Image (cartoon, rainbow, N blue to C red):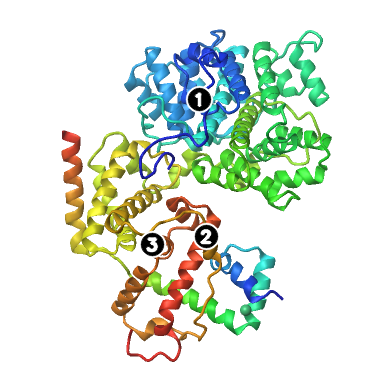
Amino acid sequence: MITCDEFMADLGNYLEGDVAVEVRRQLEHHLSHCQICQVVYDSTLKTVKIVTDSGSFDLPDAAAGPIKDKIMARIRKKSVS
Amino acid sequence: MAGFGLEWIQMSYLAEVDLGSSFRPFGALQNLFGFVPNLFRAQTLLPRIIEAEAGLAAAVLGKDRALPRSQKELMALVVAAAYGDTYCFTQQHQTLCSLGVADHQLDQIVRDHHEAGLSRPDTVLLDYALKLAMAAPWLSGKDINLLRDHGFTDESILEAIVVTGLTDFFCTLSRGLDPPHDFQPRPIPGSSKAPQADLRSYAGGTAGPYLPTVELSPERFPPFALFLERFGLIPKLFRAQTLRPDLIEAEADAVRKVLGPVDILSHVQKECIFLVGSAANLNTYCVAAHCEMLRTMGVSMEESDQIAVDHHHAELSEADKSLLDFALKLTARSSEFDREDIELLRRHGFSEKHILEAVAATALNNFFNTLQMGLGTTPDYDTKHVFGPKEAHLSSAVDRPRERAQLDPDAELVGRVQNGDLDTFEELVARHSRRVYRTLMAIIGNVEAAQDAMQDTFLKAFQHIGEFQGRSKFSTWLVTIANNTGVQRLRERRHIESLDDVPSKADAEFRPRQIRAWAEDPEQLCSQAERRELVERELMKLPVKYRVVLALRDIEQLSGQETAEALGLGIAAMKARLLRARLMLREALAPHFVSSAKRTGP
Ligand SMILES: [Zn+2]
């Protein structure tokens, strides 16, 4: 049985789906026995989902067109001169 | 992404020393090219390697025996273009211009040599070079017969094979060393239209060896004596080239100078580099040869077989595994190769000279692999694995740059802009403006400043689009520029935060404090607008390096590999930073989402 520290050490790879089968088995075994790591794992997954779904920092539709026009105007001006 | 940093200063990956003007190989290169290309100056740490390369180049390109120089350079040009190697492409382009070929004709040849007004034999020759370079496992005797039908002699076919091999050699060096350009880099025209499907046709027919040979005795031909001493036999790969003893001499010299000395990498390390490279190139002949070499050095057949199939599960030190990762990437996924791969070896304790020798050995292996595929020699030793077209279909090992470029949904548009179509850039801006803006907002956190930096990002991308070579996806390249631009802006605005790229111990040692369980469906606890505001606010409280990695991986949803590339980090360092960032944000969000949290919103 691996320790909580060992679990945390592999958590990054586990979340990224990048662990060997044998390691995955050990991690999942630990999760089924350890309440604390279970909470950390579950809430980290939920954090990722909340961040992904949040629409954070999205460019307002109204702003996209004018900025694109400014960029193209600057490029055309440069390539003419 | 090579040569693309905040300061735009281009330097090769490795240190250089001054060998003085009397260094003879430089004279030979000067004669051959009219100057000493930076590709060779980038290798001054190991003069013996430059000697070997200059000797090979002079033997292959310098003599007008069967094929004229311009025909050889034309082959090299289309092959370098197919590999997506701007450095070698630019150099060959320059050489051909100095031989009197017109610019526009060269562009047309690269775009589609079938429609460039070339003679039929020239067209067939370029078809052959491309197939040997890009789809060698599909070659057969029929491809050679087609050349013969168009008037090519056996000696000129041998030259065509060796020229293609030499181009692979130099392109690998250029990928591994990233030398500064000798000339204004030329965008490769129309590289999105690749005749991949035609190349991968296996005509079947006669097995090799394809070319006739003459008898050379080891007593009178020193290179064969060297092979006998070194390998216990004269490999068929060299016997197959006896029409041109001078080529064999130059190749034997390269073997002696690159593989002989053990002052830097050991014999076993170099043989392992050749072995994994040959396996990646699906070269049955060379895999068998290097397994045999390793056996004579005390490595069992089982062990070397394991190294060929998957070196990660072989009994090697972590440093040696990283060395083989390096060689494998440079061989099979060179489009993804960059400075970070060099850094990785440095971190494993390899010196500049070690790294240079590893690059040279990988490049020399590609040279011999190409020669062998072209000559079609049967193995000198028993083979445990037969690599061939059937396996190639299942394997990504022949993932050369041009194939990758086709996977990039922006490749076609980028190609058009590179060819001077300015209006198409507008489409690229439209496609990517949201992604660039979000990245910049995550770094800068201020709407006006981010919109301003967004303009700069696209302007820089436009100015440097000629340097984009498809080593990464265009979107990743763009995010890299956005990241650099954003961080630069932030520094100007605040003068405080530093972004050390060394993976700090702290990344790994973060301990979670909030350990109450979260609600089953936390997103129900507050509205979308509230969640967005909360995430933006808490993200901006994190140090910039953490919010950037979260923005790229979890908001942009780039792959792990792309995130690492865009940040100029290794995969492991990126993952450590990402986990730390996710855990920090988790702490900040926890009070709002634990199961007992009231539905009152944050
Ligand atoms: Zn635990």
Disc on res. B504: 2
Q: Chain of mark 2?
A: B
Q: Residues within 10 Å of mark 1 (few under 14, many from 20)?
A: many
Residue at the extreme front of the image, as rendered:
B496
Ligand 1 rendered quadrant: bottom right
User: Same chain for marks 3 and 1?
Assistant: yes
Q: Please, what is the three-letter code of the amino acid marked with disc 2? A: Ser
Circles 2 and 1, Cβ within 8 Å, touching? The answer is no
Q: Nearer the viewer, residue B321 or B425?
A: B321
Q: In this picture, is B6 found above or below B503?
A: above
Estimate the x, y position of residue B119 in percent, counting from the top left: 43, 15
Q: Is residue B545 left or right of residue B384?
A: left
Quadrant of the rendered image containing residue B413? top left
Q: Of marks 2 and 1, which one's residue comes earlier in the chain?
A: 1
User: Which residue is tagged 3?
Assistant: B544
Decide if residue A22 is in sight here.
Answer: yes
Q: Is mark 2 within 8 Å of ligand 1?
A: no
Tally of numbered discs = 3
Q: Of marks 2 and 3, which one's residue comes earlier in the chain?
A: 2
Q: CA distance from mark 3 to mark 1?
A: 38 Å
Which residue corresponds to the image point at 21% horizontal and 58% vertical from the top-left? Answer: A64
Q: Nearer the viewer, residue B15 or A74?
A: B15
Q: Is mark 1 within 8 Å of ligand 1?
A: no
The quadrant of the image that shows the N terminus of chain B is top left
Q: Please, what is the three-letter code of the amino acid marked with disc 1? A: Arg
User: Which residue is tagged 1?
Assistant: B41
Q: Secondary structure at mark 2?
A: loop
Estimate the x, y position of residue B130 in percent, counting from the top left: 51, 28
